[in-house]
Image (tube, rainbow, N blue to C red):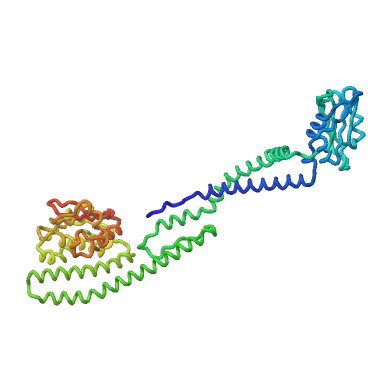
């Protein structure tokens, strides 16, 4: 059962996490600042003149003689309990005044001068260094006793709702712009930084895509990679080394087994040649030839995997003549007529002659084995660097034409072949930049076509 890979974009994930971290740090910083201000009792959080004025406004009344008095309201009592330095000064339009607490003399003297001012902030002379002299606020309000002027300063503590509202305003005014600026910078800078830091990963990935199991010693480069990625590359290189070691041991085993088989097969062939002529001798010789072919194929697998010789110009007509001459006795003994025809005197490609001879040999031997022991087997060399091997056997069903080139695959369960010949033909074709395919023969049977790149024209 296959599992769906859980991929994610590192740039997007890192960017959003950085933004959330910045937001958390800014919020924590503002919380600490506001908490420190609240705990220290600074005016930023302690000054709530509006509340004092509201309480005083709701508590004002007049006595029997018409003078201003304070009614004993619950809000006024709470305000007095909360604020030890509570003071305020009230003056109506008629000049009647009322005060509580230690009102600075300067504020009691300016009330009449501000009769035409609705509200004002009253500060002290510059460079005043007395911390007990807080700025005051004047405001005119309507009450049950008429319009009055109230002056107060440093009064009362913020209520919970107002404190939350003040903190929210502070966050929006100070924190939010900074967060937006940092988020914008993060969205722009983070992808650039990651792209630059991980530039070497693209090169390493391209190296991994070019790794071919036939080429031993392939390793990924760890140059220009982040330290966090280097262990992964090192682990992949260790795995490649283990695969190379295991593949080398496998190759040595195959080569040793093939070499060990060649001697008893040669002895068997010698003894079979001494038998009287007859159908049994032919059958035994064919079986011995298959054993010899299997041993050669095992050796060829090793030789072709290690092939590092530069390609040279190879005449496919000469290759076909050599293979036809070598296999003609075997084909005739099996009841076939082996023929060769060419479209031109010379058809050249670039490659390894021994490998191409082995590929054509496997195709002809496959035709001998599966041709139904009837009719001719034809080798045709085309002018476009193609070689066709055609028989008049039962052919290959279209549904099997791709699978027959897989290693150890047999078309029928009774097939006595090893299943390596056609696979080797395909590998040799790929080694030369070509391909092999199977078609319908002109008179039934199968036509195996080996297509190779033509050699460049030489003037």
**In the picture shown, does residue 343 fall above or below 71?**
below
Q: Quadrant of the N terminus?
A: bottom left
**In the picture shown, does residue 378 fall above or below 95?**
below
**In the picture shown, does residue 248 fall above or below 120?**
below
Left or right, 435 with reference to 366: right
Residue 319 in sight in this render: no
Q: Quadrant of residue 110?
A: top right
Q: Quadrant of the C terminus?
A: bottom left
Residue 181, given in percent of the width and then of the height, sits at 63, 42
Report the residue at 86% width, 40% height from top: 85
Left or right, 383 with reference to 72: left
Left or right, 106 with reference to 154: right
Report the residue at 77% width, 47% height from top: 39
Q: Quadrant of residue 248?
A: bottom left
Residue 191, given in percent of the width and then of the height, sits at 54, 47
Name the residue nearer the viewer: 112 or 156.
Answer: 156
Name the residue nearer the viewer: 194 or 123.
Answer: 123
Residue 318, given in percent of the width and then of the height, sits at 20, 61
Name the residue nearer the viewer: 377 or 80.
Answer: 80
> How many numbered circles does the render carry?
0
**In the picture shown, does residue 408 fall above or below 125?**
below
Residue 393 in sight in this render: yes
Report the residue at 21% width, 68% height from top: 293
Left or right, 435 with reference to 205: left
Residue 393, given in percent of the width and then of the height, sits at 13, 56
């Amino acid at each position: 059962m296959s599992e769906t890979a859980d991929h994610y974009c590192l740039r997007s994930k890192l960017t959003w996490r950085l933004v959330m971290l910045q937001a958390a740090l800014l919020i924590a910083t503002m919380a600490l600042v506001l908490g420190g201000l609240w705990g220290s009792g600074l005016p930023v959080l302690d000054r709530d003149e509006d509340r004092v004025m509201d309480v005083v406004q709701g508590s004002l009344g007049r006595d029997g003689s018409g003078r201003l008095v304070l009614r004993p309201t619950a809000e006024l009592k709470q305000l007095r309990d909360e604020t030890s330095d509570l003071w305020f000064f009230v003056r109506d339009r008629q000049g009647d005044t009322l005060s509580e607490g230690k009102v600075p003399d300067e504020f009691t003297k300016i009330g009449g001068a501000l009769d035409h001012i609705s509200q004002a902030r009253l500060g002290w002379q510059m460079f005043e260094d007395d911390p007990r002299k807080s700025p005051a606020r004047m405001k005119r309000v309507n009450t049950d006793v008429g319009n009055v002027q109230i002056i107060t300063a440093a009064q009362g503590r913020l209520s919970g709702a107002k404190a939350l509202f003040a903190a929210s305003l502070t966050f929006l005014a100070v924190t939010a712009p900074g967060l937006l600026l940092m988020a914008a910078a993060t969205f722009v800078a983070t992808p650039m930084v990651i792209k630059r830091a991980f530039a070497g990963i693209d090169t390493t990935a391209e190296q991994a895509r070019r790794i071919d199991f036939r080429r031993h010693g392939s390793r990924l480069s760890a140059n220009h990679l982040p330290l966090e990625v280097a262990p992964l590359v090192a682990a992949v290189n260790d795995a490649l080394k283990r695969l190379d070691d295991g593949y080398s041991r496998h190759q040595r085993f195959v080569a040793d087994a093939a070499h060990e088989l060649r001697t008893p097969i040669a002895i068997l062939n010698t003894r079979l040649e001494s038998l009287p002529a007859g159908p049994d001798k032919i059958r035994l010789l064919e079986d011995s030839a298959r054993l010899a072919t299997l041993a050669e194929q095992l050796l060829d697998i090793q030789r072709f995997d290690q092939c590092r010789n530069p390609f040279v110009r190879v005449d496919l007509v000469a290759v076909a003549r050599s293979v036809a001459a070598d296999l003609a006795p075997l084909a005739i003994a099996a009841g076939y007529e082996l023929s060769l025809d060419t479209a031109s005197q010379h058809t050249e490609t670039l490659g390894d002659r021994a490998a191409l001879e082995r590929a054509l040999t496997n195709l002809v031997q496959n035709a001998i084995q599966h041709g139904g022991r009837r009719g001719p087997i034809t080798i045709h060399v085309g002018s476009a660097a193609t070689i066709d091997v055609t028989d008049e056997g039962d052919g290959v069903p279209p549904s099997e034409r791709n699978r027959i080139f897989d290693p150890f695959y047999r078309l029928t369960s009774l097939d006595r072949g090893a299943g390596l010949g056609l696979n080797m033909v395909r590998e040799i074709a790929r080694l030369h930049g070509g391909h092999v395919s199977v078609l319908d023969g002109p008179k039934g049977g199968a036509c195996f076509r080996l297509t190779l790149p033509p050699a460049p024209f030489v003037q």
